[in-house]
Image: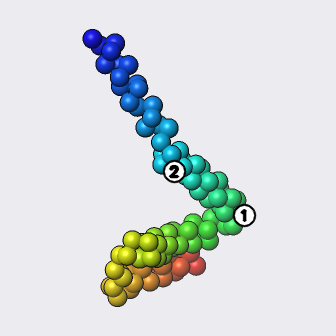
Amino acid sequence: MKLSSKASTADSVLPAYLSPWLLSSVALYGVSFLLTVRVLAVNPLSVASPAMAGATFGLITLLSWVLLGEALGMQKLAGIVLICGGIWLLARA
């Protein structure tokens, strides 16, 4: 009985690992890692790390507004400006 349950589990798990969504996300994560390593190798860490952190906030907000139709209020925009401004000030210190 136990052997048959293991076989059915393996049969159902393998297609999940070969899913195009999973494989493409792993590939994109690898590309992201390589680009991050490249950016950190070329630029000073005190500049690159804060710039990437600030860009993350801005890009996620912009893409969620464009692709998902998320509302952008003045409060959200002000928060993003304050976060990016704080990151900029810390990078200059």
Residue marked by disc 1: 42
Could you tell me which residue is drawn at 39 percent across and 71 percent down? Answer: 68
Task: Kindly state the secondary structure of the residue where label 1 is placed.
Answer: helix
Residue 41, horizontal then vertical, whole percent? 70, 59
From the image, which quarter does the C terminus lie in? Answer: bottom right
Could you tell me which residue is drawn at 45 percent across and 35 percent down? Answer: 15
Spot the residue most to the bottom: 74
Spot the residue most to the right: 42
| Residue 93 in view of the camera | no
Q: Amino acid at mark 2?
A: Ser
Residue 82, horizontal then vertical, whole percent? 42, 82
Spot the residue most to the left: 1
From the image, which quarter does the N terminus lie in? Answer: top left
Rendered view: 37 above or below 87: above
Q: Which mark is residue 81?
A: none
- In-image side of 45 versus 6 (left or right): right
Quarter of the image where one finds residue 81: bottom left
Could you tell me which residue is drawn at 35 percent across and 22 percent down? Answer: 8
| Residue 8 in view of the camera | yes
Task: Kindly state the secondary structure of the residue where label 2 is placed.
Answer: helix
Which of label 1 and label 2 is nearer to you?
2
Residue 34, horizontal then vertical, whole percent? 64, 53
Residues 75 and 27: in front is 27
Quarter of the image where one finds residue 52: bottom right
Q: Amino acid at mark 1?
A: Val
Residue marked by disc 2: 25
Q: CA distance from mark 1 to mark 2?
A: 26 Å
Mark 1 or mark 2: which comes first in sequence? 2
Label 2 neighbour load within 10 Å: few <14, some 14-19, many 20+: few
